[in-house]
């Protein structure tokens, strides 16, 4: 009996070991919104017994079983070194664009060079799956070769041109708005003209980026593959999308929408915040510009306007404030270094969310049906906010021209005009009504890829062809060539036949024609 139970125990242990796989997470861009997506999915995979190794600039604060961090130290300090670059990016769209690609190039290079990454590469460790952030860092697809594993990319900013370009996902310019621009999916002629030019502009940047990425890869590895070959390493894409915040568009079967995956169940709030919000009889406003744009580092005149505006409203205000020393604040304002945003938005008294419009924040706002005042700064924030305004779930303000009056009237507008909360409540209902909660969708597909050693069968096979072949220009040229040849041959035969005296019929018709003309 004892032997039997021991044997059963050993067998079940072996089965568990066989089920548990080694998974590598690579989140080398030190942006919190990128990290969050990967962390949520990998933590859940760890919970299911898989062995997780996570390369990132954000090691876990409280350790989790089966989850080991490889810390890219220095990255956060680097990206946060100069907050003023964001203010510059806010003012100039082109600078925003250029700045983003410069960041991408810099951090791809830094990651390959980082000692922690170098030692992981040299360790010869192999994995069953790589879950990796997608931020136009094509060179990182080479990790698939190094660690001999299938790749799932997570796209924190949804299904944009950058992603479509990568895996040949169709993107009709007539109704899929260009990423980073203000177009929607309902475009008149001028919009469609502008949108087409915008996508071509984005693709020109992507082409330039690809050359830079190849240079970085060639710098660190001899005989590295070409980027266009590496794209075939991609098994699946988890896109941070859902029809409530991304307009309907084509998705290849290897694109799995998991928008809303990062929204957590609300936790107990810290007591002081809980009491503050509970007592907000006229409602509360929550202010946060995200993890990169620090409220406490805003220019003084803007900060002054914000605080003055708060003193003029009847709501209580929760303000994310990153420094120890506080400015003089009106009584209805409470500041905190760390704000559990998810649980704050879940509080029924929070009526307005003043946000930079980052996609993660927008999704949380939709989930908890909290209308927004969008103050976009950089990246895709402007587009997100413009779309929210069009959908009637937000009011937009400009950071560099933020006046006390504009902020007060925006807050009053959202409090007094119930259409904002009605519209966002509808979206919230749609987002929460899915056949499978997004995290379960993600886990199913991650384990699917591991069960089948990849899912390359879902790829668009046109990725094996170049642009010339994809547009069938080679076929068209061949057909034209054949046609020209046939015409040429017929002509030759015809001319030759004319010269033959035995061909009486031909001569007869010829003479008849000539006679006709003489008439
Ligand atoms: C998990 O993977 C890491 C990295 O390959 C390895 O060092 C560790 O021993 C593994 N842990 C288990 C429990 O298999
Ligand atoms: C990559 O970083 C190294 C220094 O670590 C630098 O010398 C090199 O120019 C960088 N390359 C690119 C393409 O940025
Ligand atoms: C595959 O890619 C080609 C070329 O980019 C595109 O025309 C086609 O629509 C894509 N196929 C599917 C099924 O999306
Ligand atoms: C909006 O409501 C506030 C009180 O919340 C009030 O002071 C203000 O006059 C209202 N504005 C409009 C336009 O109704
Ligand atoms: C409320 O806001 C909506 C959307 O901005 C607008 O169309 C509507 O006219 C507003 N209603 C009032 C009473 O101001
Ligand atoms: C996946 O690869 C492993 C090891 O190479 C092999 O044992 C297994 O049969 C493969 N599974 C499938 C479905 O191809």
Image (tube, rainbow, N blue to C red):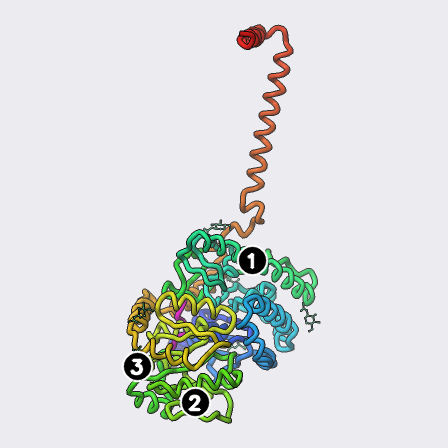
Q: Is residue 186 above or below residue 35?
A: above
Work out whether residue 489 or residue 52 is closer to the camera in this orientation and state it: 489
- The quadrant of the picture occupied by the N terminus is bottom left
Work out whether residue 440 or residue 276 is closer to the camera in this orientation and state it: 276
> What is the distance, in whole Å, between disc 1 and disc 3 at their CAs?
44 Å
Q: How many C-alpha atoms fall within 10 Å of the one at disc 2: few (<14), some, or many (≥20)?
A: some
| Circle 1 or circle 3, nearest the eye | 1
Residue 350 in the image, given as x and y percentages of width and height: 34, 82
Disc 2, SS: strand
User: What residue is disc 1 on?
Assistant: 201
Q: Earlier in the sequence, mark 1 or mark 3?
A: 1
Q: How many marks?
A: 3
Q: How many C-alpha atoms fall within 10 Å of the one at disc 3: few (<14), some, or many (≥20)?
A: some
| Circle 2 or circle 3, nearest the eye | 2
Q: Is the residue at mark 3 in contact range of ligand 4, meaning its CB lies under 8 Å from it?
A: no
Residue 398 in the image, given as x and y percentages of width and height: 47, 74
User: What residue is disc 3 on?
Assistant: 348
Left or right: 37, with 81 as reference point = left
Residue 240 in the magenta stretch? The answer is no
Q: Looking at the image, which residue is at 39% across and 88% down? A: 311
Residue 101 in the image, given as x and y percentages of width and height: 59, 67
- Most common secondary structure along the magenta stretch: loop
User: What residue is disc 2 on?
Assistant: 335
- Asked if residue 147 can be seen in this view, the reply is no
Residue 125 in the image, given as x and y percentages of width and height: 59, 71
Residue 260 in the magenta stretch? The answer is yes
């Amino acid at each position: 009996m004892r032997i039997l139970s021991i044997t059963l125990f050993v067998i079940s242990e072996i089965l568990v070991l066989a089920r548990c796989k080694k998974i590598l997470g690579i989140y080398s861009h030190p942006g919190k919104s990128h990290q969050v997506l990967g962390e949520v999915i990998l933590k859940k995979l760890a919970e299911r017994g898989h062995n997780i190794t996570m390369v990132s600039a954000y090691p876990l604060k409280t350790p989790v079983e089966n989850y080991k961090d490889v810390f890219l130290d220095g990255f956060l300090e680097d990206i946060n070194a100069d907050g003023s670059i964001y203010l510059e990016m806010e003012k100039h769209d082109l600078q925003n664009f250029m700045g983003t690609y410069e960041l991408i190039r810099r951090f791809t290079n830094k990651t390959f060079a980082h000692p922690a990454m170098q030692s992981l590469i040299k360790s010869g460790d192999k994995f069953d799956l790589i879950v990796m952030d997608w931020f136009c860092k094509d060179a990182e697809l080479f990790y698939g070769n190094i660690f001999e594993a299938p790749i799932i990319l997570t796209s924190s900013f949804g299904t944009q041109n950058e992603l479509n370009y990568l895996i040949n996902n169709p993107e009709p310019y007539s109704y899929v708005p260009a990423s980073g621009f203000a177009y929607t999916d309902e475009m008149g002629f001028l919009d469609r003209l502008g949108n087409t030019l915008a996508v071509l502009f984005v693709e020109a940047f992507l082409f330039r980026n690809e050359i830079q990425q190849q240079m970085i890869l060639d710098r660190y590895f001899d005989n590295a593959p070409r980027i266009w070959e590496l794209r075939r390493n991609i098994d699946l894409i988890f896109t941070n999308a859902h029809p409530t915040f991304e307009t309907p568009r084509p998705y290849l079967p290897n694109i799995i929408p998991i928008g809303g995956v990062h929204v957590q169940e609300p936790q107990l709030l810290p007591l002081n915040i809980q009491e503050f919000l509970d007592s907000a009889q006229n409602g509360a406003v929550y202010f946060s510009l995200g993890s990169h744009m620090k409220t406490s580092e805003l220019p003084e005149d803007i900060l002054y306007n914000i605080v003055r505006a708060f003193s003029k409203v009847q709501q209580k205000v929760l303000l994310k404030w990153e420094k120890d020393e506080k400015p003089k604040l009106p009584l209805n304002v409470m500041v905190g270094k760390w704000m559990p945003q998810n649980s704050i938005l879940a509080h029924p008294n929070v009526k307005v969310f003043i946000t930079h419009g980052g996609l993660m924040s927008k999704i949380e706002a939709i989930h908890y049906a909290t209308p927004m005042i969008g103050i976009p700064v950089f990246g895709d924030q402007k587009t997100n906010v413009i779309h929210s305004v069009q959908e009637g779930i937000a009011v937009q303000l400009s950071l560099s021209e933020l006046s006390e009056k504009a902020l007060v009237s925006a807050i009053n507008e959202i409090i007094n005009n119930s259409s904002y909360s009605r519209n966002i409540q509808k979206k919230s209902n749609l987002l929460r009504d899915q056949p499978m909660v997004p995290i379960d969708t993600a886990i199913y597909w991650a384990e699917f890829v591991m069960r089948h050693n990849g899912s390359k069968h879902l790829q668009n096979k046109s990725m094996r062809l170049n642009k010339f072949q994809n547009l069938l220009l080679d076929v068209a040229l061949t057909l034209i060539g054949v046609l020209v040849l046939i015409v040429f041959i017929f002509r030759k035969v015809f001319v030759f036949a004319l010269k033959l005296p035995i061909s009486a019929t031909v001569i007869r018709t010829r003479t008849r024609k000539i006679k006709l003309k003489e008439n």
